[in-house]
Image (cartoon, helix red, strand yellow):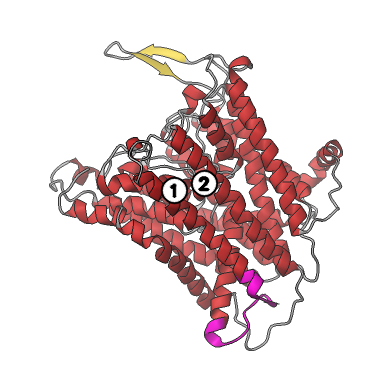
Amino acid sequence: MRANGIVQILVFFEIVLLLTKPTGMFLKKVYCDEQHLLKRILTPFERMIYRLIGVDPSAEMNWKRYSVAMLLFSLVSTLALYALQRLQGYLPLNPQDIAAPSVDSSFNTAVSFVTNTNWQGYAGESTMSYLTQMAGLTVQNFASAAVGMALAIAFIRGIARHETENLGNFWADLVRGTIYVLLPLSLIAAMLFVSQGVVQNFKSYDFAATLDGAAQTIAQGPVASQLAIKMLGTNGGGFFNANSAHPFENPTPFSNLIQMVLIFLIPAGLTYTLGRMVRSQGHGWAVFSAMALLFFAGTFTTYWAESRGNPIYPANVDQAVVGGNFEGKETRFGIANSALFATVTTDASCGAVNSMHDSFTPLGGLVPMVNIQLGEVIFGGVGAGMYGILVMIILTVFIAGLMVGRTPEYLGKKIEAYDVQMAMLYTLIFPVIILVLTAISVLAPEFGLASRNNQGAHGLSEILYAYTSATGNNGSAFAGISANTFWYNTTLGIAMLAGRFMMIIPALAIAGNLASKKQAPATLGTFPVNTGMFTLLLVGIILIVGALTFFPVLSLSPILEHFQMNAGATF
């Protein structure tokens, strides 16, 4: 590791830290329907939307009605995006006359973008028309992010309120998150990206001849508008197949920095929103600190592993000159920013990549995988990270209560059997989906193993990472697996659906149960949730839950590969 790289990592985090409070305060004002600058400007537009969809924003919902509204909206979104893909060959804004994707690919993509996963088993520039990219994928980037934010706010309301069954209005939360947060910030980000050289047009693709006379296709399109919400909404689906490693999608070091900051902006801000809404700002900062500790641990582990490189090569070859393992990385960004980007995108359930994780060293690739397997609570996806960490907090205060022999309490509310049961259901669904589908795939040579590009431990990592990414609604990949097959399109789609909606329901059930409880004042025996001890205990619970569940399979994949690499083995 080099001092220059360490400084860049610290500067990035300092920017995120400085933006956390203003972002969190703004989010609180938006979702609590308080006055802010944009409300004065956009209130007529907000009211018009409510009239069009026939919604009374003041009509509150309990957790069941909130869940049903969210599920119905997601179902309609999935069907609409599927239909748009299947019909794109007959629709306008398709200058390359790109045919419709297959049935299984269209299903996978529709589910992927509606669940905020944005897994892509296809090459974007050669599979999707401009209309599909804009009216389908980009629209769902906004919608799925707004849904995640709404769910996080509903959970926070469940903690903040007492003796009520209401968690807010899903449609109002959806609309406000979109028009006051996502649209304005995306507009600013898109203009910044255009200033850096990200393309934004409707031109047909250009064709050029290379120096050796070969034909080259240069893709064009409305990239900047999709890129902005791709990062801000922690969606991650790239316009181009190379994602943020493509020079038209991420042309400069400054555009690279903007993208990483956008990924963490809302998830970090929600920790401050949590503190404001539950009237315990110290608690919000304690949660932020837990996320920050895990972020730094992952970032510097990845940076160290990639800087160390592969010991199989002599010290006098190119990896010593460039400072480590440069395979699969862009020279524009280097090892430090590749390691940082990989950690940020898997911490925050984004999935965008500026380097190929499949080319990382075993320990360098282990960190992004573990980031997702921890439940993506290290800042996490937009909204999803917040309600995920809140479930971990429920388990933390429950265990803390057991250790001191008291009834567990969280901010004055007793944590009872129902809350713990729902929290355990939430945490068990995730590994069951990943491990069962991975096991089936590795036992099926004809449709599971055939898609690997590597054998041995690394091949297992490719399959395990795919199902981890899909179930965790991340969307990144080792990219060493050919996933655009009927088996992987179908099973990954099922994993995305289960990883999103089967985990949301128990989370909302906890929120509804917490909202109905009485709030008691703190006593000398109350476990404080705004201290360094709470932060460390929360980090410990997150690591234990992930380590105990996934350590056996990880020991057969990246951990085994690390020892094999040191012994001189290659794949």
The kind of residue tagged 2 is Ala
Q: Is residue 203 above or below residue 437?
A: above
Observer-nearest residue: 437 or 250? 437
Q: Which mark is residue 437?
A: 1
Q: Residues within 10 Å of mark 1 (few under 14, many from 20)?
A: many
Is 547 rendered above or below residue 341? below
Whether residue 251 is visible here, answered yes or no, is no
- Coordinates of residue 391 in the picture (x, y in percent): 59, 64
As displayed, is residue 500 above or below residue 164?
above
Task: Report the amino acid beneath label 1.
Answer: Leu
Quadrant assignment for the N terminus: bottom left
Give the secondary structure at mark 1: helix
Extent of the magenta region = 402-420
Q: Are marks 2 and 1 in contact (CB under 8 Å)?
A: yes
The Cα atoms of the two marked residues, 2 and 1, are separated by: 8 Å
Q: Residue at x 79, y 52 (%)?
A: 169
